[in-house]
Image (cartoon, helix red, strand yellow):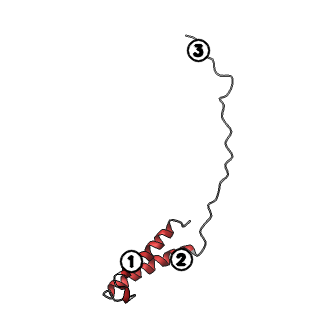
Amino acid sequence: MPESKGRDKASYTPPPEARTTKVAPSSPPWFAPVMLTLMVLGLLWVVVFYVTQQKYPVPSIGRWNLAAGFGLMMAGFMMTTRWK
C-alpha cells in the first residue's frame, strides 16, 4: 500500500482579531456606603419596631413601619445589583 504524501503548505490559521477591551466604569465612591447604610437602617427600623412592641419608630403609621423598613432594605439590595 502506498504512503500518503505530506502537505507542502501549512494549514491556514486566521490572524487573531484585534479586540478592544472596554473597562466597565466603576461605581462612584459614595455608592457602597449609601448601599450599606440603607440596608442597615432598614434592619434597625424593623428591629426597633418589634423591640418597642410596635410603638416606634413612627407610631402614627402602625404596621406600615414594617413596609418602610423592608423598603429601605430593598432599596439597598437593589443598589447591590448596580455596584461595580
- Residue 56, picture quadrant: bottom left
Verify CB contact (< 8 Å) between mark 2 and mark 3. Answer: no
The x, y position of residue 37, in whole percent, is 49, 78
Mark seen at residue 33: 2
Is residue 77 toward the left or the right of residue 50 in the image? right
> Which badge, 2 or 1, is on the more N-terminal residue?
2
* Disc 1 from disc 3: Cα separation: 82 Å
In front of the other: 75 or 8: 75
- Residue 1, picture quadrant: top right
Q: Which residue is mark 3?
A: 3
Is residue 55 toward the left or the right of residue 6 in the image? left
Secondary element under disc 1, as helix, strand or loop, is: helix
Q: Which residue is mark 1?
A: 67
Is residue 32 toward the left or the right of residue 11 in the image? left
Mark seen at residue 77: none
Secondary element under disc 2, as helix, strand or loop, is: helix
| Structural crowding at the residue carrying mark 3, measured as other residues with C-alpha within 10 Å and reported as few (<14), some (14–19) or many (≥20) | few
Secondary element under disc 3, as helix, strand or loop, is: loop
The x, y position of residue 55, in whole percent, is 34, 89
* Disc 2 from disc 3: Cα separation: 73 Å
